[in-house]
Image (cartoon, rainbow, N blue to C red):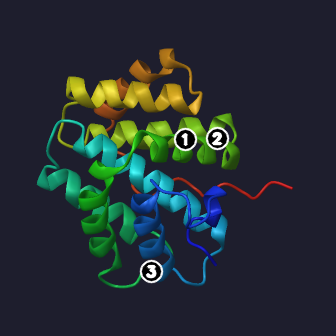
């Protein structure tokens, strides 16, 4: 199967090589999972990495949190989480606006409003892992929330909730159930 088929694209369309690289890695790490799970993991992973990189660097605590999140994915092989983190930190900065747009549209089609809110909550938790949410992280969080159709007025309460949480939630939010 064409690795870009999950986005409704074929190999002949240019500008999606970066998403394809991440998708291929996720599919190789989790070969028995369904396509919808691969798509969800790719998109949420991209968004988590965007939050982590929004201040220009991925701090060691942010990288470790990403790694810990991915280790909690069922059937993730030993070393797979770190491998995925390495691909993400290399590839995500190269994503084009078009590729990001595809991610937002796909997540909106996979998830209902409550599930998208849970994704934004997870992103806020990632932004707060170092004990503060930098202005650039807050800005990126607001952009993502807006693109996902999560009311922008919920971003600040989610950020405050993430900062005040003694132990931010660990683990990717549940993958959405496939809709008929």
User: Which percent across, then down, holds residue 178?
Assistant: 76, 58
Q: Which residue is mark 2?
A: 108
Is residue 167 visible to us here? no
Q: Secondary structure at mark 2?
A: helix
Which numbered marker is on residue 24?
none
Measuring 61% from the left and 77% from the top, which residue is drawn there?
33
Q: How far across and down, in percent of the image, does residue 85 sit?
A: 29, 65
Q: Is residue 30 above or below residue 175?
A: below
Q: Secondary structure at mark 3?
A: helix
Residue beneath label 3, please? Answer: 29
Quarter of the figure with the N terminus: bottom right
User: Which residue is at a point 24% across and 37% down the rendered structure image?
Assistant: 54
Q: Which residue is mark 1?
A: 104
Furthest residue to the right? Answer: 180
**Disc 3 to disc 2: CB gap under 8 Å:** no
How many C-alpha atoms fall within 10 Å of the one at disc 2: few (<14), some, or many (≥20)? some
Q: Is residue 18 above or below residue 132?
A: below
The crowd level at tag 3 (other Cα within 10 Å; few <14, some 14-19, many 20+) is many
- Residue at image x 55%, y 67%? 11
First along the sequence among labels 3 and 2: 3
Whole-number angstrom distance, CA of label 3 to CA of label 2: 24 Å
| Occupied quadrant, residue 32 | bottom right
Circle 1/circle 2 CB separation < 8 Å = yes
Q: Could you tell me if the residues under marks 1 and 3 are in contact, i.e. CB atoms within 8 Å?
A: no
């Amino acid at each position: 199967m064409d690795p870009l088929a999950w986005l409704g694209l074929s190999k002949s369309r240019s500008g999606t090589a970066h998403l394809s690289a991440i998708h291929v890695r996720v599919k190789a790490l989790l070969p028995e999972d369904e396509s919808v799970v691969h798509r969800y993991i790719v998109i949420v992973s991209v968004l988590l990495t965007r939050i982590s990189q929004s201040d220009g660097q991925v701090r060691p605590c942010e990288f470790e949190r990403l790694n810990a999140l991915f280790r909690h994915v069922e059937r993730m092989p030993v070393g797979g989480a770190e491998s995925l983190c390495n691909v993400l930190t290399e590839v995500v900065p190269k994503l084009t606006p078009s590729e990001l747009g595809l991610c937002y549209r796909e997540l909106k089609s996979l998830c209902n409003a409550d599930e998208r809110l849970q994704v934004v909550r997870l992103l806020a938790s990632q932004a707060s892992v170092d004990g503060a949410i930098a202005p650039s992280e807050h800005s990126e969080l607001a952009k993502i929330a807006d693109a996902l159709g999560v009311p922008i007025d919920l971003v600040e309460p989610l950020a405050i909730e993430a900062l005040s949480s003694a132990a931010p939630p660990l683990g990717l939010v549940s993958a959405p159930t496939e809709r008929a």
